[in-house]
Amino acid sequence: MDWNFSVVWNHLLPLYFAFLTTVWISIGSITLGTAIGLILGVLSLISFSFISWLARLFIELFLALPTLVLLVWLYYSLPLIIPGFIIEGQSCAILGLGLSLSAFVAEIIRGGINSVPSGEIEVAYCTGMSRIQAIRYILIPQVFRKSWPPLMGQYITTYKFSTLASVIAVPEILHTANSIIAQTYRPLEIYSAVAVIFIITIIPLNILLRRIQRVKQLGGIEKI
């Protein structure tokens, strides 16, 4: 097998626009998933409430559903259940990936809130803080500090899962790569280029995440 990467160079522009589509799908699904997940995470902690039960049911449902199955169901099955309902492929990808992500975000947020000792909130009340102030200055900073590393991990996973949109004909990077391969019959070069694109975008994010974690850990040690 001879390698000929000129085929990648000749199709660099379509791959570039496909990469932008991939990034847009990732940003949209991360934004949607984070917003829904935050709401679900808080609602799931309400004691003895029907709303809390619904939130937990939603979380369990989307934790159990594989992302690929969810995307295919939304795109092909939902229009059959709701006659006249048509969802465009890119919007479907954002919705499906966002719903899948929201369940994990909700679990992370719920875990972060539960990890804050209730005694710290009570101490805040004793010092004269209102409920809103206690949430703003005590609860939210701790939840954010404990939740953002796993959240970043989920965001990176969602970025990688954006390639699943190819199964519903969204012209993201994997779908475009398959179209180029069908024309050129050079799968090794094209798939290698796609792999390199993900490597050079994800590895720096992982390194940055670990570095920030290390700095925060050292900062915590110094405070002790």
Image (tube, rainbow, N blue to C red):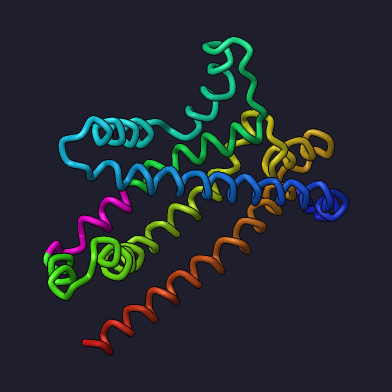
Q: Quadrant of residue 218?
A: bottom left
Measuring 66% from the left and 30% from the top, which residue is drawn there? 89
- Residue placed farthest to the right in the image? 10
**What secondary structure characterizes most of the magenta part?**
helix
Q: Position of residue 145 (x, y in %)?
A: 34, 68
Residue situated in front as seen by the camera: 122 or 13: 122
Measuring 55% from the left and 65% from the top, which residue is drawn there? 203
**Placement of the C terminus among the 4 image quadrants:** bottom left
What is the span of residues highlighted in magenta in the rendered image?
Answer: 107-118
Q: Please determine whether, in this image, residue 53 is positioned above or below residue 145.
A: above
Q: Please determine whether, in this image, residue 133 is positioned above or below residue 8.
A: below
Q: Please determine whether, in this image, residue 94 is positioned above or below residue 130.
A: above
Q: Image check: 78 left or right of 152?
A: right
Please state the total of marks drawn on the protein image: 0
Measuring 71% from the left and 50% from the top, which residue is drawn there? 19
Q: Image check: 100 left or right of 126?
A: right
Q: Quadrant of residue 143?
A: bottom left
- Residue placed farthest to the bottom in the image? 222
Q: Please determine whether, in this image, residue 214 is positioned above or below residue 59.
A: below
Residue situated in front as seen by the camera: 136 or 214: 136
Q: Position of residue 79 (x, y in %)?
A: 58, 15
Taking the magenta stretch, the answer to whether it contains residue 41 is no
Q: Position of residue 101 (x, y in %)?
A: 44, 43
Q: Image check: 193 left or right of 130?
A: right
Q: Position of residue 214 (x, y in %)?
A: 38, 78
Measuring 78% from the left and 33% from the top, which residue is drawn there? 182
Taking the magenta stretch, the answer to whether it contains residue 112 is yes
